[in-house]
Image (tube, helix red, strand yellow):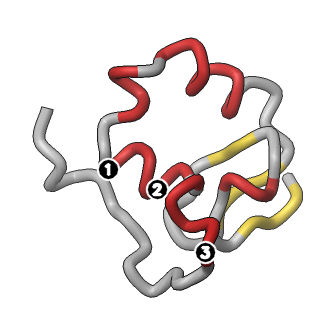
Amino acid sequence: MSHENIQENTDCNTPEHQTHLCHLMYEGFHFNHREEYKQMVQDAQFRCQFCGRTAKSERQLCSPQPL
């Protein structure tokens, strides 16, 4: 799959950005670590205002908002 449709928030310059879903998805994490990815997004409690992804923990998103 091409990365051209997967957005990464290049403006997020927090040290934790490498653990954010937009970065992980861009790197293909969801293909290579399916079970870990599933645990991150299952029963999501937050949505990223930048990319629209949802996650269980706000720490996994650049701009989290509660659902």
In the rendered structure, the answer to whether residue 47 lies left or right of residue 6 reads right
Mark 1 to mark 3: distance in Å? 17 Å
Given residues 11 and 66, the one toward you in this image is: 11
| Closer to viewer: mark 3 or mark 2 | 3
The amino acid beneath tag 2 is: Cys
Label 1 vs label 3, nearer the camera = 3
Of residues 39 and 48, the one drawn nearer to the viewer in this rendering: 39
In which quarter of the view is residue 58 placed?
bottom right
Relative image position of residue 13 (x, y in whole percent): 53, 84
Pointer 2: residues within 10 angstroms few (<14), some, or many (20+)? many
Is the Cβ of the residue at disc 1 closer than 8 Å to that at disc 2? yes
Residue 16: x %, y % from top left: 63, 66
Tell me where residue 42 appears, x and y as whole percent: 73, 24
Specify the amino acid type for callout 1. Tyr
Mark 3 and mark 2: span between their CA atoms? 14 Å
Q: Is residue 47 above or below residue 15?
A: above
Give me the C-alpha separation between circle 1 and circle 2. 6 Å
Relative height, residue 67 to residue 65 (above, below): above
Residue 6 placement (x, y as % from top left): 29, 52
Q: Earlier in the sequence, mark 3 or mark 2?
A: 3
Task: Say whether residue 33 is left or right of residue 57.
Answer: left
Q: Which residue is mark 1?
A: 26
Q: Which numbered marker is on residue 22?
A: 2
Residue pointed to by mark 3: 15
Name of the residue lying farthest toward the front? 15
Q: Which quarter of the rendered picture does the N terminus lie within?
A: top left
Whether residue 30 sits left or right of residue 56 in the image: it is left
Circle 3 residues within 10 Å: few <14, some 14–19, many ≥20: few
